[in-house]
Image (cartoon, rainbow, N blue to C red):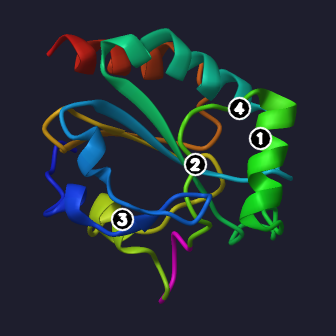
């Protein structure tokens, strides 16, 4: 893949608690951007994503979660409910952002930048690995779990570049 989304760090975002944000504060880090949902068969990935975040955050790595309700309406809650669910059930401390659309006419600008001409997000928990320079290094299917060897190797390689 290895494309650089133009202006990735300047795209306006909102944190799950409603504060204005951008990826600018993560510039120079390796990021794993994931569209997440609380009522999906893949929801237990939250635990593995948190372990990845904890394992490598000291080396300039962050998992960033973007709740989305477009797949089977599996993220129906408010931001407050989503945040409480993630914290209570999975001990999530990695950054979560405002619920967004990742497909369709209301696709968030972040996902337009990540996907480019690459079609659509297929389901909850699709993952994008972003290099320290803001380039999209890899895209992983929803069923690729946080403990997957290829995902872990890709993160480790990005951290050592």
- The first of marks 1 and 2 along the sequence is 1
Q: Give the range drawn in magenta.
A: 101-105
Count neighbours of disc 3 (C-alpha within 10 A) and say few if under 14, some if 14 to 19, many if 20 or more. Answer: many
- For the residues bearing labels 4 and 3, Cβ distance under 8 angstroms: no
User: Which residue is at a point 62% across and 31% down the rendered structure image?
Assistant: 93
Q: Is mark 4 on a helix, strand or loop?
A: helix
Above or below, comparing residue 3 to residue 113 in the picture: above
Q: Is mark 3 on a helix, strand or loop?
A: helix
Count neighbours of disc 2 (C-alpha within 10 A) and say few if under 14, some if 14 to 19, many if 20 or more. Answer: many
In the picture of the structure, the residue carrying the numbered disc 2 is: 96
In the drawing, does residue 132 fall left or right of residue 32? left
Between the C-alphas of marks 1 and 2, the distance is: 9 Å
In the picture of the structure, the residue carrying the numbered disc 1 is: 86
Between label 3 and label 1, give the one nearer the viewer: 1
Between label 2 and label 3, give the one nearer the viewer: 2
User: Which residue is at a point 86% across and 33% down the rendered structure image?
Assistant: 89
Q: What element carries label 1?
A: helix
In the drawing, does residue 84 fall left or right of residue 59? right
Above or below, comparing residue 59 to residue 19 in the picture: above
- The first of marks 4 and 1 along the sequence is 4
In the drawing, does residue 47 fall left or right of residue 24? right
- Residue 158 location, quadrant: top left
- For the residues bearing labels 2 and 3, Cβ distance under 8 angstroms: no
In the picture of the structure, the residue carrying the numbered disc 3 is: 110
Between label 2 and label 4, give the one nearer the viewer: 2
Q: Is residue 80 visible to us here?
A: yes
- The first of marks 2 and 3 along the sequence is 2
User: Which residue is at a point 64% across and 57% down the rendered structure image?
Assistant: 123
In the picture of the structure, the residue carrying the numbered disc 4 is: 45
Between the C-alphas of marks 4 and 1, the distance is: 11 Å
Q: Where is residue 157 in the image (x, y as percent from the top left)?
A: 26, 14
């Amino acid at each position: 893949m290895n494309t650089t989304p133009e202006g990735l760090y300047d795209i306006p975002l909102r944190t799950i608690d409603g504060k204005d944000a951008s990826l600018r504060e993560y510039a120079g880090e390796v990021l794993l951007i994931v569209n997440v949902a609380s009522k999906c068969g893949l929801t237990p990935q939250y635990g593995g994503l948190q372990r990845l975040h904890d394992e490598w955050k000291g080396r300039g790595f962050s998992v960033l979660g973007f709740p989305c309700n477009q797949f089977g309406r599996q993220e129906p809650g408010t931001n407050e409910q989503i945040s409480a669910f993630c914290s209570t059930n999975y001990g999530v401390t990695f950054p979560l952002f405002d619920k967004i659309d990742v497909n369709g006419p209301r696709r968030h600008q972040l996902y337009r930048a990540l996907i480019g001409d690459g079609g659509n997000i297929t389901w909850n928990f699709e993952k994008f690995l972003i290099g320290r320079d803001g380039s999209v290094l890899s895209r992983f299917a929803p069923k690729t779990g946080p403990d997957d060897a290829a995902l872990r190797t890709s993160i480790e390689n990005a951290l050592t570049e």
